[in-house]
Amino acid sequence: MKNPKGSRPGKIGDALQDYLKSSGLAPRVEQAGVIPNWKMLVGTQIAAVTEPISVSAGGILFVAVKTSAWMSELSLMEPELLRSINKDKSTGSIKKIRFRLTR
C-alpha cells in the first residue's frame, strides 16, 4: 500500500484488511470466526460436549463430540445449528457441519 509523499503511514489493520480482501482470504478468516465464538453461537450445553476443530475452504465446519448420543442429537439439530451460526454477521457462511466422535 503506497502513501503519497509527505502523508502519514496507514494503519496496519487497514493494510491487512485490504490484503485479505484482495487475496480472497477474507471469507476464510470470517468462517474461522466460528471457532472462538462457538459457545455464544450454540449455547453452553452444546459447547460443553463439543469442540470446533476447523473450517474447510468449502465451508464445512468440523466439530469434535464427546459421546455418540450427543453426536446423533447434534446431527438432527444441524439445520438449526447452521441457522444460528450463519445469522451471526461476525462469522462467514458455514454450509455443513461434520461431527466426529472423540474418545
Image (spheres, helix red, strand yellow):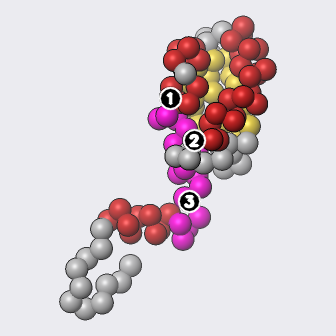
Residue type indicated by callout 1: Met
Residue type indicated by callout 2: Asp
**Badge 2: how crowded within 10 Å, few (<14), some, or many (20+)?**
some
Q: Is residue 73 above or below residue 98?
A: above
For the question of whether residue 32 can be seen, the reply is: no
Q: Nearer the viewer, mark 3 or mark 2?
A: 2
Return the x and y of residue 69 as percentages of the image width and height. 72, 8
- 37 to the left or right of 77: left
The residue stretch that appears in magenta: 21-37
Query: What is the spatial separation of the Cα atoms under label 2 and label 1, in whole angstroms?
Result: 10 Å
Looking at the image, tell me whether mark 1 or mark 3 is earlier in sequence order. Answer: 3
Report the residue marked by disc 1. 40
Report the residue marked by disc 2. 88
* Magenta stretch holds residue 27: yes
Q: Is residue 15 above or below residue 33?
A: below
Looking at the image, tell me whether mark 2 or mark 1 is earlier in sequence order. Answer: 1
**Badge 3: how crowded within 10 Å, few (<14), some, or many (20+)?**
few
- Mark 2 and mark 1 residues within 8 Å of each other at the beta carbon: yes
